[in-house]
Amino acid sequence: MSYLQIKNISKSFYGVKALNNISLDLELGEIHVVIGENGAGKSTLMKIIAGLYQADEGEIILKGNPVKIGNPVEAIANRISMIHQELMPVPYLTVAENVFLGREPKNKAGMLDKKAIIRGTRELFEEMKIEIDPRAQMGTLSVAQVQLVEIAKAVSFNSELLIMDEPTSAISDREIENLYDLVFRLKAQNKAIVFISHKLDEIFKVADRITVLRDGEYIGTRMKTELDKDTLIAMMIGRELKDVYERRDKNIGETILEVKNLGRRGRFEDVSFTLRKGEILGIAGLMGAGRTELAEAIFGLNPSDSGEIYIKGKQVQIRSTSDAIKNRIALVPEDRKLLGLNLKDTTGFNISLSVLKLFEKMGILDKKAENDQVDRSIEQFGIKVMGRKTPVVSLSGGNQQKVVIAKWMLSKPEILILDEPTRGIDIGAKTEIYKLINTLANEGKAVIMISSELPEIIGMSDRVLVLSEGRLTGELHEGGISQMEIMKRATIQNKPLSEVG
Ligand SMILES: Nc1ncnc2c1ncn2[C@@H]1O[C@H](COP(=O)(O)OP(=O)(O)OP(=O)(O)O)[C@@H](O)[C@H]1O
Ligand SMILES: [Mg+2]
């Protein structure tokens, strides 16, 4: 008898089937990877087990007994907890208060026992090798840190089943290694773990068994040892995938952007480089190296406070994002939830919002032109959505990312900065995005691509800059770009930045 059996589960949203008759077994002491393209139904299935959604049909059998999991509290009572793909921290509470949310220990006076939760959080973090101050405000944490806190929180419930929905999508290599250690320890403690991921290397590292979903259908479950990457990809997308990075004919032109001794106090310092038309410049580095900060400075989001920026040889001042947009610079941000999207609005509105002027005729918005463009974008980027009126919040993670890219592409940038453009995106959609980036470069656009996925940096870039601790530590050219050369430079210890800002 399996620990947990999912039997014939179906679920629709507004008449659209997200899951169709899914059956699946989970065992204790097993790491079970669930994989599938964006929108395949992975998160939906897991949210049903974790009590966030109710299935329309089917049942869940826990240790031989049918259970009804009506809400997350009932899930925890059944010793099931889930780390969500869409992180939901409470920004104005401290880290410790977030960890103990809903089960706060009280002191003798019946008040929140702040000392106890700080102590509890500190112990938990120590065990998990997490270096975050339990007293920090949640809102001041980076995405990666928030993800770590959420992982720690889920672990602290001491559940039998731990569902991790893309737990490594935003954390750095070192933290990822710690997470793997933790996952293997939990397995050794005979827990059941569901691990959702789009990263094939990772999947082959952690999995015992792998289940594939496609378009809400169950495709199959295999032992990892029975599978190779090509077979797995074929199961996922229903066809073979060749040449993910597809080299383009190169057409590298004159320098369009030059950055000289750029810095932002406490973040990065003395960064100089050039970018040419038609070039894809990769930026690699560990988390905290200053890559996002550099991108945000060039885009005027968090302007630089030293150094110079030149566009086509002319010095420009970029003090705000509108300065950047005027100079035809666009940024697809790392954190799409915070900066990229208005979640409650429709897909169409999100795509056209920043370029409504394009559809104006004598000062009046031409709704039809706008809608036509939105529909073309949805089609072009393969955004899986009912229609342009569908709220973005109901799209799967990867499809939300495509909406952000589609939105920025409409502003016709000459310099496109992509910060982790394929984070959380499935391999099929990734290939589409790579194709798109290559096409843009071919058309003479200059692209800066920040990515933590080295295969992607190596596969896509014409040139790679490496940052470490806020400084440029290397520049690699074609022929010399490899995982080892990047890592060597990414881990160089620098003298500290001059002042913390
Ligand atoms: N709350 C919701 N309202 C409406 N539709 C939803 C909702 N949640 C999910 N869906 C739809 O159900 C389908 C499955 O989505 P789900 O989030 O489970 O995919 P996923 O496999 O986790 O994808 P990803 O890899 O992008 O995270 C998608 O078509 C999605 O748009
Ligand atoms: Mg998901």
Image (cartoon, grey):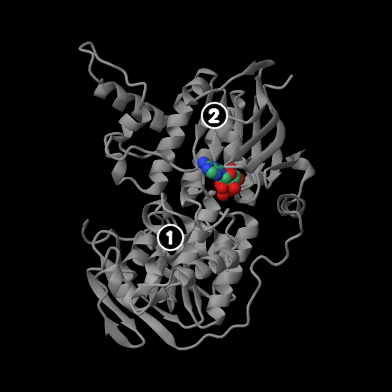
Residue type at mark 1 is Phe
Can I make out residue 383 in this image? yes
Image mark count:
2
Left or right, 233 with respect to 71, comes to right
Q: Which mark is residue 221?
A: none
Mark 1 vs ligand 1: CB below 8 Å: no
Q: Which residue is mark 2?
A: 50
Q: Residue at x 70, y 40 (%)?
A: 210
Q: Position of residue 31 (x, y in %)?
A: 64, 34
Q: Position of residue 194 (x, y in %)?
A: 61, 34
Q: Which residue is mark 1?
A: 349
Instruction: Please tell me whether mark 1 sits on a helix, a strand or a loop.
Output: helix
Residue count near mark 2 (Cα–Cα under 10 Å), binned few <14, some 14–19, many ≥20: many
Q: Quadrant of residue 126?
A: top left
The quadrant of the image that shows the C terminus is bottom left
Above or below: residue 71 compared with residue 316: above
Mark 2 vs ligand 1: CB below 8 Å: no
Q: Position of residue 316 (x, y in %)?
A: 27, 81
Disc number lying in front (1 or 2) = 1
Instruction: Please tell me whether mark 2 sits on a helix, a strand or a loop.
Output: loop
Left or right, 201 with respect to 465, comes to right
Residue type at mark 2 is Ala
* The one of 99 and 51 positioned closer to us in this rendering: 51
Above or below: residue 278 compared with residue 281: below
The quadrant of the image that shows the N terminus is top right
Q: CA distance from mark 1 to mark 2?
A: 32 Å
Q: Position of residue 71 (x, y in %)?
A: 50, 25
Q: Quadrant of residue 360?
A: bottom left
